[in-house]
Image: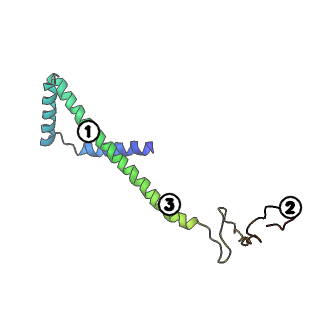
Amino acid sequence: MTTLIARRSQFHQASLAAHLDAGSSSLIARLGALTRALQHAGDTSVEAARQAYGVIYRQLSQQAQTLAYADVIFVFACFAAAMVPLVFLTRERGEAGDGPLNRCGIVLHQMPAREPPLCSARRPSSRSAERC
């Protein structure tokens, strides 16, 4: 599972980075806003620009990781959906009239019903009284 997440994360990171255009006006505006916010927090302009690129990379990495987890959940959901029909295909069934099956597929024989006792109440005295 970990390998699948790592590989899918790398795939999505490469895909997202390929769509990240350095000349994009939205990227330039986002980097400018981050740089100004970091400069306002006390960083130098060079350090603020470097950290702004780090923030963009961290966001790209988080989005790639999220997409990787979604891919893995989808794969597991497909496996789980494929297992449901297999439950019905692997279930053993006895022939009609054989009786119920136990877990090993062996036909259980029906036990006859128990007969009710001869008397409904015990008599308190006498050991030689009839058995109930």
Q: Amino acid at mark 3?
A: Met
Kindly identify the amino acid type of the residue bearing the numbered disc 1.
Gln
Q: Which mark is residue 83?
A: 3
Q: Position of residue 25 (x, y in %)?
A: 12, 42
Kindly identify which residue carries mark 1.
Answer: 59
At label 2, counting other C-alpha atoms closer than 10 Å, the crowd grade (few under 14, some 14-19, many 20 or more) is few
Nearer-N-terminus badge (3/1): 1
> Distance from label 3 to label 2 (Cα)?
63 Å
User: Could you tell whether 80 is left or right of 31 in the image?
Assistant: right
Callout 2, which amino acid? Arg
Q: CA distance from mark 2 to mark 1?
A: 89 Å
**Colouring mode (rainbow / by chain / secondary structure / one colour):** rainbow
Q: Earlier in the sequence, mark 2 or mark 1?
A: 1
- Disc on the earlier residue, 3 or 2: 3
Residue found 84% across the figure and 66% down from its top: 129
| Drawn side of residue 81 relative to residue 13, left or right | right
Mark 1 residue crowding within 10 angstroms, few (<14) / some (14–19) / many (20+): few
Which of the pair 15/45 is nearer the observer? Answer: 45
